[in-house]
Image: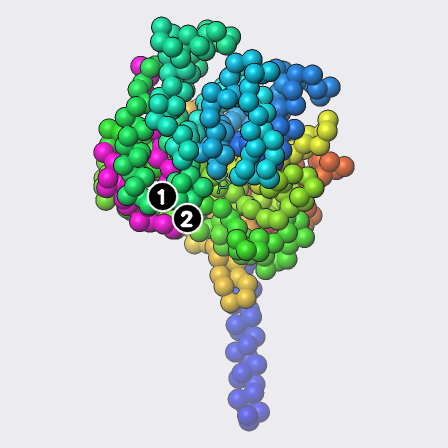
Amino acid sequence: MTILTRRLFALGCFALLFLQFIIAQSPVKINLQEKQKPTIISKHIYGHFAEHLGRCIYDGFYVGEKSDIPNTDGVRNDIITALQELKVPNLRWPGGCFADSYHWKDGVGPISERPTIVNRWWGGTVEDNSFGTHDFLNLCEKIGAEPYLAANVGSGQVQELADWVEYVNSKGGGPMGEWRKKNGREKPWNVKYWGVGNEMWGCGGNMTPEYYANIYRQYATFMPDWTGKGMYRIASGASEDDYHWTEVLMRDVKKSLIEGVALHSYSVIDWGNKGPDITFSNAQYFKTMKKAWRMEELIRKHTAIMDKYDPKQEIDLIVDEWGGWYDGDKEMGVLYQQNTMRDAMIAGVTLNIFNNWSHRVKMANLAQTVNVLQAVLLTKGHQLVLTPTYHVMKMYNVHQDAELISVQFDTPSYEMDGESLPALSVSASKNAEDVIHVSLVNIDHQQGHEIALDLEDLGVNQVSATILSGDDLQAYNSFEKPDQIKPVAFKQVKYTNGKVSLVIPPFSIIVLQGK
Ligand code: AHR
């Protein structure tokens, strides 16, 4: 190389660096626009899931009436309060895989007469059926959530499900309604949401979609509406990108028999090696984020198939299992895992995706509520910890039943080992009082981003914000330090003449309120 070419090369490198600096510094402009045809973000997108698994029900929700942990009918009072404050819209139960081996009649009537079974799906624990239908439905009433019952199709019978529907929903007169009254509950619970089996392609019976579609039609036929308010039947849906499953269900089940089709997708790096819950590397974090972002592709592609058979969008997509899945502390229970800032990022990104697809996604259930997988609550003896995921769900509950606002922006990228992901995730809504909420997530673990939003046309006069962030990605709320991560007011927001500007720090979530 001559001196001249070397100088030119050095100049070129400098110019490139300078350009990069400029790009990193120039604000990301986010345009918000009210939709021509309003879409309501169903509150049910913020649903939860509780399975008879590990320490979710027993030693989680339910400690029994004789426990010295303060409880109401055996359910921990601190959990009831935490879930009331979270505004849990619905709760799915009793599984999961457990649902397809659960016989509901084992869990009603005098506790002393209930049979004991072994939970063969999860750890072979002894299940004494002390927490059953009454306990679950009464719990839902206490926390103000709609119950979502997952029925046993894999090892159950059509009559068993028909009886369950009658037991919980009929006013009486028939054998099931009268049995319910004898067991202490006069009024029906009017359960609207019903899952017809769970993961029928796997633990629900290893069925083909063609076979399941027929079975589904049979079961759904015997689920009459005792309430007069409408039944909502959800078919067990695809795992991840099994588009054929969705195609067959949409093709073979007639509309009068189905209200929702499910989808299960976990943010797991590799099923053979899920990686640690706390001591994960930056590369593992990146892979988890890649899986979290994949939810958008899955929803887009499943929706495209649904649109083909249901252009009027009368059948909903129900993501009734989602969340992060790692290798946690087995001593703390089956599928127990800690919950770090990585989980907060999964929740922030995924909920934004659900909001932005809320014309088709009408319900979703985070797996699982207490002590299992991406839990919002962790318990140990008398102690209860609110996880970072709890805080995200609570910050985001402002979107429940609000009108979706379209967001447009060019996201900076978050790069690692030659791969690239969108660094920013955003969704926005307007509630019944015309208050605007914008939820912003920056998954980049190193770089903050300057953001500019124009709220003038939305009639906003004042702005405030809340932030969730941590000292590092691996930060979590432990039983010793339960308040390491919690939302705080974010004051560094500039607001002039309808224009908002702020810098979102690395791995953080900001919810902006404008009114
Ligand atoms: O949520 C844990 C398990 O994951 C559920 O039981 C099952 O449906 C899924 O595979």
Q: Is residue 347 visible?
A: yes
User: Which label sits on residue 207?
Assistant: 1
Residue 233 location in percent, x, y? 34, 29
Q: Amino acid at mark 2?
A: Glu
Q: Is mark 2 within 8 Å of ligand 1?
A: no
Position of residue 178 measured from the top left corner of the image (x, y, whole percent): 42, 7
As rendered, which of 114 and 438 lies closer to the eye?
A: 114
Q: Is residue 127 left or right of residue 384?
A: left
Q: How many marks?
A: 2
Secondary element type, mark 2: loop
Q: Earlier in the sequence, mark 1 or mark 2?
A: 1
What is the span of residues highlighted in magenta in the rendered image? 228-254
The numbered dot on residue 235 is: none
3D distance between C-alphas at marks 1 and 2: 16 Å
In the image: residue 214, left or right of residue 163 = left
Is residue 247 in the magenta section? yes
Q: What is the three-letter code of the residue carrying label 1?
A: Met
Image quadrant assignment for residue 76? top right
Q: Quadrant of residue 370?
A: top right
Q: Which residue is mark 2?
A: 240
Residue drawn where x is 59% and y is 37% of the image: 124
Name the residue located 39 percent from the left edge and 23 percent from the top edge: 160
> Where does the N terminus fall, quadrant-wise?
bottom right
